[in-house]
Image (cartoon, grey):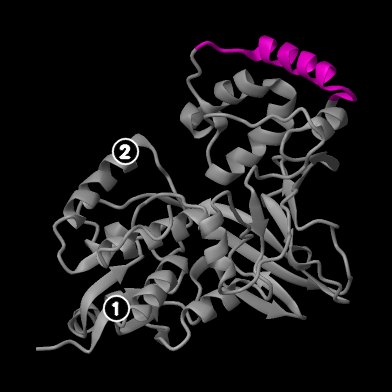
Amino acid sequence: MEKEYDYLIVGSGLYGAIFAHEATKRGKKCLVIDKREHIGGNIYTKPVEGINVHTYGAHIFHTSNKRIWDYVNSFVEFNRYTNSPVANYNGELFSLPFNMNTFYQLWKVKTPQEAKAKLEEQIGDAYVENPQNLEEQAMSLVGKDIYFKLIKSYTEKQWGRKATELPAFIIKRLPVRFTFDNNYFNDTYQGIPNGGYTSIIEKMLEGIEVRTGVDYFKDREALNDIAETVVYTGMIDEFYDYRFGTLEYRSLRFEHETLDTDNYQGNAVVNYTDAETPFTRIIEHKHFEFGTQEKTVITREYPSEWKKGDEPYYPVNDARNEEMFKKYKELSRSETNVIFGGRLADYKYYDMHHVVGIALKKVAEVFKEEELIM
């Protein structure tokens, strides 16, 4: 019997929206469902007091791939926002990423030569030939001052574990710049869509049937029956009823507050790197779009342990979880009418430009075309 839809897309985040848009362009009929009451997944932005609030944490688009940049700008034009976070350590402010501004703030050094000499001295005092944990790895890369003020407590809050209990591979390298450059990313292109991220998802899903507040797992059989193929962007272990065990994630809790001031912290992102502050950062959303509104909205971000029922944000890619994921990945290869894709299905932390790239690559593969984005 002919099915009502060619594709059922589970999840209206970036991966699902791109796949639905591209499949529809090729004459396919799609239904997009989402468990949440809104579209956009974690990049959903909601207007509050005329400010586009990043409901699930800051999302800054950055890429060096011009074709990916042109692709997202074909839906909504992006602004010129440049991510330049500030670190607050017990009231002291430091520039990020680690650059000449940071070194001056730490040590009052004024030239690259002075900064290099100080850094080499710090690394020499803390160097470990074969680091066994994150603490040893970080101190071997940048020394004790940067580590204790800007890395240790922030990382421990993020992961909910002591740095001495975290594997060294979490920090493979720590970028250090000997220029006065506070631009966090090295990519050629960077910005925020004008009007927020929801606007880009709305453009992608124009003319496509979307149902929000629909939990795929509550009516899985009936939903599967109406489409030829399922495009699944959720947790891969949940799809298989946790057959091989439950993959671990870190979760986040967001505390949003509207304040009767036009400027709370003067920057979109301020990281709190001390142990006493329970949250990792405060986001002031208006600065993403250079807002001049009379009020402001801030969000405090609290990392937490994930348990079933919580929103999963960061995969815990240690050896145990990677081994378990391989079993799920192998099982997924036997599916003939299910396409898995995105951060949760691939159990991998992706930046947004990665998601665009893998979604378009999958579209090209499914429709047997040349790769859309190289």
User: Can residue 115 be found in the magenta stretch?
Assistant: yes
126 displayed left or right of 242: right
Residue at the left extreme of this rendering = 1
Query: Is 68 inside the magenta-drawn segment?
Result: no
Residue located beneath label 2 in the image: 320
Left or right of residue 341: residue 58? right
Q: Report the disc number at residue 8.
A: 1
Q: Amino acid at mark 2?
A: Arg
Compared with residue 50, is residue 319 higher up or lower down, i.e. above or below? above
Using the rendered image of the protein, determine whether residue 185 is visible from the camera's viewpoint: yes
Query: Going by the image, does 188 lie left or right of 219?
Result: right
The reply to whether the C-beta atoms of the residues labelled 1 and 2 are less than 8 Å apart is no
Question: What kind of element bears circle 1?
Answer: strand
What range of the chain is rendered magenta? 107-129
* Residue 240: % across, % down: 22, 61
The majority secondary structure of the magenta stretch comes to helix
Quarter-of-image position of residue 292: bottom right
Q: Is residue 335 above or below residue 123?
A: below
User: In terms of depth relative to the viewer, which is nearer, 17 or 145?
Assistant: 17
The location of residue 2, given as percent across then percent down, is 13, 88
Q: Amino acid at mark 1?
A: Leu
Question: Residue 285: x percent and y percent?
Answer: 73, 66
Q: Name the image quarter holding the N terminus.
A: bottom left
In depth, the one of 362 and 237 nearer the eye is: 362
Callout 1: few (<14), some (14-19), or many (20+) C-alpha neighbours within 10 Å? many
CA gap, disc 1 and disc 2: 32 Å
Nearer-the-camera pick, 182 or 189 = 189
Look at 76% across and 17% down and name the residue there: 116
Residue at (19% x, 80% y) in the render: 221
Picture quadrant of residue 184: top right
Q: Which disc is residue 259 wearing?
A: none
Q: Residues within 10 Å of mark 2 (few under 14, many from 20)?
A: few
